[in-house]
């Protein structure tokens, strides 16, 4: 499979400028100054963008391959989507509101962008990291848990139940 070439440096500068523009727009909407935050292009896989806070460091991350394949849509939707997460964090705190809740939707509407939680992209040609899946069973079905959930079950930190029959999932032998 032939992979898409990530966005160019010129396009990255356009994305950074658009991000800053939405932050400034948010400052006007709420009558307060929001600081510009770092923008990096280090996401891969099927996620177009991500707002992340680690300790006190805020950053907006974008996927340069998805932006290359869907540049106009990403500029129109992904950029304001991630900026809206940043503004919600500044205004309300991340732990106090739902990620795509009423506050986030209100900001998206104020930006004039439909408040969609996820995009639907054809990911052909986008480099993907595949998660390993582990088979589990219940009374009525077979289930596949990703590595993180499987490891939590193995360490005794979590149990998962079938949504249909309610039985605890057990690892296939």
Image (cartoon, rainbow, N blue to C red):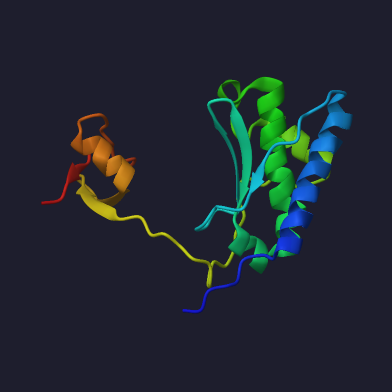
Decide: is 156 above or below 74. Answer: above
Which residue is at the far bottom?
Answer: 1
Q: Place residue 67 in its image quadrant.
A: bottom right
Give how far across and how far down residue 151 sits, in percent.
Answer: 25, 40
Give how far across and how far down residue 135 sits, in percent.
Answer: 22, 53
Decide: is 21 above or below 122. Answer: above
Answer with left or right where residue 41 lies relative to residue 112: left
Give how far across and how far down residue 85 sits, in percent.
Answer: 66, 35
Which residue is at the far left?
Answer: 173
Q: Residue at x 29, y 52 (%)?
A: 144
Q: Residue at x 24, y 52 (%)?
A: 134
Q: Place residue 71 in its image quadrant.
A: bottom right
Q: Residue at x 60, y 71 (%)?
A: 5
Give how far across and how far down residue 74 sits, in percent.
Answer: 70, 57
Nearer to me, 107 or 13? 13
Answer with left or right where residue 164 lies relative to residue 42: left
Nearer to me, 41 or 2? 41
Residue 170 is at least partly visible in this image: yes
Decide: is 61 above or below 53. Answer: below
Q: Residue at x 22, y 41 (%)?
A: 169
Answer with left or right where residue 5 lies relative to residue 115: left
Q: Place residue 37 in its image quadrant.
A: top right
Residue 115 is at least partly visible in this image: no
Q: How many marks?
A: 0
């Amino acid at each position: 499979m032939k992979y898409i070439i990530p966005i160019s440096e010129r396009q990255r500068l356009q994305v950074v400028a658009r991000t800053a523009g939405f932050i400034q727009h948010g400052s006007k909407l709420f009558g307060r100054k929001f600081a510009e935050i770092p923008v990096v292009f280090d996401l891969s896989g099927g996620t177009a963008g991500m707002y992340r806070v680690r300790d006190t460091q805020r950053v907006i991350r974008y996927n340069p391959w998805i932006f290359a394949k869907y540049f106009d849509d990403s500029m129109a939707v992904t950029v304001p989507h991630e900026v809206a997460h940043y503004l919600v964090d500044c205004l309300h705190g991340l732990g106090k509101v739902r990620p795509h809740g009423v506050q986030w939707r209100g900001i998206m509407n104020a930006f004039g962008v439909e408040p969609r939680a996820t995009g639907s992209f054809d990911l052909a040609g986008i480099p993907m990291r595949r998660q390993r899946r582990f088979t589990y069973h219940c009374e009525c079905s077979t289930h596949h848990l990703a590595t993180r959930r499987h490891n939590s079950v193995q360490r005794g930190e979590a149990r998962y139940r079938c949504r249909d029959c309610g039985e605890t999932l057990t690892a296939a032998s």
